[in-house]
Image (cartoon, grey):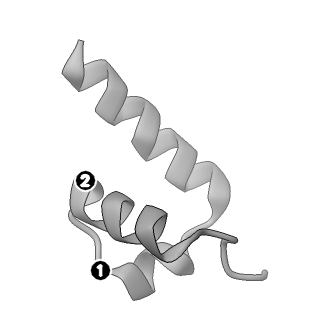
C-alpha cells in the first residue's frame, strides 16, 4: 500500500487533530483516516 498523498501542511494539521505522529498518519489506510475525520466532525457538532 502506498503512503497517503498529503501535503506537508495537511499531514501536520491532521496529525495534530488526530493526536497521531505524522509517520503513523502517512501509513494509515485511507479509509481509517476518513473514518477518524468523520468522528472528529461528529464531536464538533
Q: Is residue 28 above or below residue 3?
A: above
**Residue 9's x, y, as percent?**
42, 68
In the image as oriented, which residue stretches furthest toward the right? 1
Q: Residue at x 56, y 80 (%)?
A: 27
| Of 41 and 31, the residue lying toward us | 41
Q: Dot 1: few (<14), some (14–19), or many (≥20) neighbours within 10 Å?
A: few
Dot 1: element: loop
List the residue tagged with mark 1: 21
Would residue 12 appear left or right of 34 to someone viewing this image? left
In the image as oriented, which residue stretches furthest toward the top? 45
Mark 1 touches mark 2? (CB < 8 Å): no
Dot 2: element: helix
List the residue tagged with mark 2: 17
Q: Is residue 29 above or below residue 2?
A: above
Q: Dot 2: few (<14), some (14–19), or many (≥20) neighbours within 10 Å?
A: few
**Residue 36's x, y, as percent?**
42, 45
Quadrant of the drawing holding the N terminus: bottom right
Would residue 41 appear left or right of 44 to someone viewing this image? right
**Residue 45's x, y, as percent?**
24, 12
Q: Which residue is drawn at 35% across and 70% down?
A: 12
Q: Distance between the residues labelled 1 and 2?
A: 10 Å
> Which quadrant of the view contains residue 13?
bottom left
Would residue 12 appear left or right of 31 to someone viewing this image? left
Amino acid at each position: 500500500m502506498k503512503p497517503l498523498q498529503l501535503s506537508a501542511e495537511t499531514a501536520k494539521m491532521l496529525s495534530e487533530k488526530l493526536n497521531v505522529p505524522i509517520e503513523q498518519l502517512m501509513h494509515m489506510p485511507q479509509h481509517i483516516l476518513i473514518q477518524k475525520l468523520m468522528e472528529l466532525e461528529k464531536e464538533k457538532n
